[in-house]
Each structure stands twice: as structure tokens, then as C-alpha cells.
Image (cartoon, helix red, strand yellow):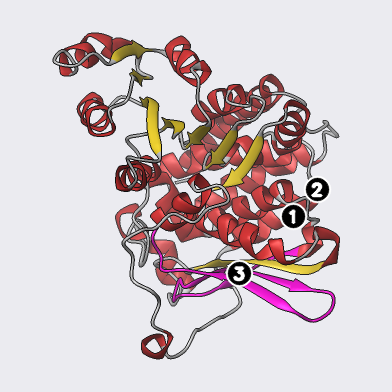
Amino acid sequence: MRKITILGATGSIGRSTVDVVSEHPDKFEVEAVVGGSNVETLAETAKRVKARCAVVADATKLADLKEALSDTDIDCGAGEKAVLEAVDRPADVILAAIAGTAGLAPTYASLKKGRRIALANKESLVCAGQSFMKAAAAIGAEVFAVDSEHNALQQALMAGQSQDVTIATITASGGPFRTWSREDIAAAPAEVASRHPVWAMGAKILIDSATLMNKGLELIEASHLFDLRADQLDVVVHPDAIVHAIAQWRDGAVTAGLAAPDMRIPIANALGFERRLKMPYPVLDFVKISRLNFEAPDEERFPCLKLAKAVLRAGGPLPAAMNAANEVAVAAYMGGQIKFYDIYTLVAAVCSVYAGEGVRAPASVEDALAIHNDATKMAQEHLELILAKH
């Protein structure tokens, strides 16, 4: 039996993790489940997996959580301190899926000797990847990828050593605007941008997928996870969503990670350690699939990807600043304040400032959050300028 704590238990990754754990009650026991503010779903989840502890991040929801779990002996907590206390409880695996910078501190605190961090919180690597991976190595914690692309790449890279990789490629479905003209994309509202053709995800990630910023962020994650240079990483559009990552080697060999587009598959791989968990999913029928399609991403129609690649090459504080500015821009777009391409304009404006500062990469969570807060303020100022022009 392995003890697991699920951070972000009420989100899409958390729910998929609950499905995997529920398929194997003889292999996992859940120590704690942590959610944001959805008390009803958190309580239902805690009961389903028989968690010992349930924590809601919203400090005002403690009474509601206690009421929802009053017929159980599950420990309850609320607020930032309670989240960190849940992280500190005994566990072999921490599934880190709290979205946004809110997940940065809890994910960092999860690093303990002998633990596996099943990582789905992008900000830990985008905002503080260098320090996060260094800390994990020093402590003796194992960081294992959960995102479908990174998990597939992790498996593909087992065929060799990172210095022998010529190109490591992650795939993108292309999002809802893959075949749209720039003019049509420019006029599209957030509700249309949120209609992903393959994956069901959180609202913010859906917009990031539409701009292809999500793939740029994943390139930055991959560089830290696998110690790969910017020139060893690439993105290809693959609308079939069957091939999730490809590793090409200097001897001409190629290895790839393929699976049906279901997040429970990479999660099962992350939780299984050296053993594959048996899951009730059909085997891919390649005769029915018939062909696999690939195309180059159009960085003119999707300039956020081009910007993210430049940020990856530059490093320093830029990834954290870009992430913060993107959060502000996406929220404004979702709120109907700005147009689709204003997202790129705003994020690029903030990045241009940080590109000239010569600030070092964040060496700690505190450094990363400081950059995030500064860049957020700057992005909000640029947002006001954009709104004034409209």
C-alpha cells in the first residue's frame, strides 16, 4: 500500500487521479485531499477515497467542510497553513495539481526525501524550475511528470541519455483555431476559444491551448524536467492526439510515447512506480486509426508560442514574468475586456521589460513569487493602456 496525498483534488487532474486510485484500493490509501473552494466536491471526494484528511484552501469554508463531513471521522482543515500541514502528513506520493501560483508553495513543501512528486503544477517549473529541480535532487525527492506530453516524453527518454537526444518533441492538438484564419481568430470570443477539440480542462488552460501558450509553457517545463537545452526541444501539431511526445537520437533512432487522449493513463503511470497498473482502457487499434497527421505550428497566427520559445532561450526571470502576465491577460480575455491577440501584446510588453533587467533566475519560491507579483502589477498597468486604446 502506498500513501498518496492529492493536491487539487477537485480539478480535472485531481478527479482523474481519484478514478485511478479507486480502481486499485488494494494498492493506494489516501492520506489527504486538498481543494480550492468547492466544499461539496471536496467532501464527496474525501468520502469516496476514504481520505484521512480533507483541506479546503479557502479559509472561510472550514465550517462548511466540517458540516459536509460531519458523518465521518475525516480530519478537516482550511486555509494556507492547513494546506501546508496536509502536505506534511506522511505520504509516499504527492499528486501536485493545484493550478496557478497558488500551487507553488505547497508543491515546494512537498519535496521530502524518498517521496515521489507526481507533478501537474506548471508554475513549479515555469516560475522556479531551476531551483525546484535543484532542491528535489538535494533532498532526494523524485519528480515524475503527469502531463500527458511530459509523461510520454519521460517514457520515451528512457531509451537513452539526454546528451544523446537531438530533438525532443511534444505535440499539440492545435486547439480550436488550428484551421482558422488570423482574422477570424482575432474576432473570436473566449467562449469559442474554450471549445477544445480533444481535452476537457480548466478554463484558463483551455485559453492557453487556444493561443498555444500552453505548449510554450510545456517546453519550459520539459527543459527543467529532463535537463534539455532550448535547441533540443520542439513542438509539432498533431490533431489526432495519439502521439504525445517524440525523442530523436543522434544515431537516427526515434522513440515515441503514444496513448489514447485520457489523463488517467499518464497518472496511472506516475502512480505505478516501476509496475504498470492495470486500467480498463481499450488498446489502440492502429488499423482503425489508419494514419497519424502532423503539421508545423503557425507562429504567425499563434505568436504566444514564438514568444515562449524566446523566453525559454533567454531564461532568467522571464519565464516567471511571462507566466504572470499571461494570467492577467487570459483573465481579461475571459472577462471580455480584451481581444484574442491582445493576450500576446500584453504578455510581450511585460517580457520586453524583464528582458532588459538582467535579473537572475529565481533561487527560491519567495524569489519566484516576488517576480510574479511585480510582473502581475506591470501587466495590470499594461492592461489599462490597452483598455484605454479600445
379 on left or right of 133: left
Residue 337 coordinates in the image, percent (x, y): 39, 43
Q: Amino acid at mark 3?
A: Glu
The residue nearer to you, when weighing 24 against 153, is 24
Percent position of residue 150, x then y:
59, 55
Query: What secondary structure is found at the residue carrying circle 3?
Result: loop
Amino acid marked by disc 2:
Ala
Quadrant in which the N terminus is drawn = top left
Give the quadrant of residue 253.
bottom right
Mark 3 or mark 1, which is nearer the start of the sequence? 3
Point 68% across, 27% down: residue: 368
Residue at 63% across, 26% down: 111
Answer above or below: position of 53 versus 294. above
Q: Residue furthest left?
A: 71
Mark 2 → mark 1, Cα distance in angstroms: 6 Å
Question: Residue 162, how many percent across, how many down?
Answer: 80, 59
Identify residue for label 1: 310
- Residue annotated with mark 3: 300
Question: Disc 2 on helix, strand or loop?
Answer: helix
How crowded pointer 2 is (Cα within 10 Å; few <14, some 14-19, many 20+) is rated as few
For the question of whether residue 85 can be seen, the reply is: yes
In the image, what residue type sits under mark 1?
Answer: Ala
CA–CA distance between discs 1 and 3?
14 Å
Region in magenta: 233-262
Q: Secondary structure at mark 1?
A: helix
242 in the magenta segment:
yes
Q: Find residue 277 and name its label.
A: none
Q: To which residue does mark 2 refer? A: 314
Residue in view at x 57 percent, y 80 percent: 295
